Image: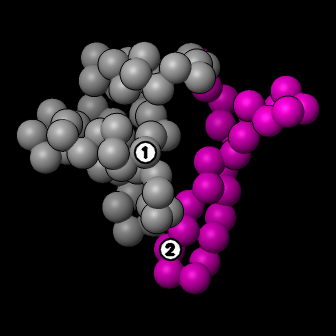
Amino acid sequence: MSTSGALLRWQFQRGSRTSDLAIKPAFITNDMDLLVDAALQGSGVGYLLREQVAEHLAGGRRVELLPESSSIAWKHVGA
């Protein structure tokens, strides 16, 4: 959430082009461990740092969504 209380839009980058997406989440948390656990349990898509999910991606437990469109720091991970 931003300081205004509004949800932040998910940002994507593909080459030099940047776009963003307004989402309607069913689950909101600022606890990244809880968010990783929720994604691992199949609760949906998470907007996560690479470092938080590298082990799960390498182990094949989760897949990266939109790998060609991910920004430098974030990964979109789904079941």
Which quadrant would residue 46 be assigned to in this image? top left
Question: For residue 2: magenta?
Answer: yes
Marks 2 and 1, Cα distance to the nearest angstrom? Answer: 17 Å
Q: Secondary structure at mark 1?
A: strand
Q: Residue furthest left?
A: 59
How many residues crowd mark 2 within 10 Å: few (<14), some (14–19), many (20+)?
some
Residue under label 1, please give it.
49
Q: Looking at the image, which residue is at 63% across and 70% down? A: 18
Residue 8 at x, y = what percent?
Answer: 72, 40
Report the predominant secondary structure element of the magenta stretch.
loop
Between 7 and 72, the one lying in front of the other is 72
Q: Inspect the image, locate mark 1, and give the three-letter code of the amino acid beneath it.
A: Leu
The residue most toward the right is: 4
* Residue 14, placed above or below residue 42: below
Q: Determine whether, in the image, residue 60 is placed left or right of residue 51.
A: left
Q: Residue at x 90, y 32 (%)?
A: 4
Is residue 76 found inside the magenta-colored segment of the image? no
| Residues drawn in magenta | 1-26
**Residue 42 at least partly seen:** no
Label placed on residue 14: 2
Q: Position of residue 54 (x, y in %)?
A: 24, 45
Horizontal and vertical percent position of residue 12: 56, 61
How dense is the environment of label 1, judged by Cα within 10 Å: few (below 14), some, or many (20 and up)?
A: some
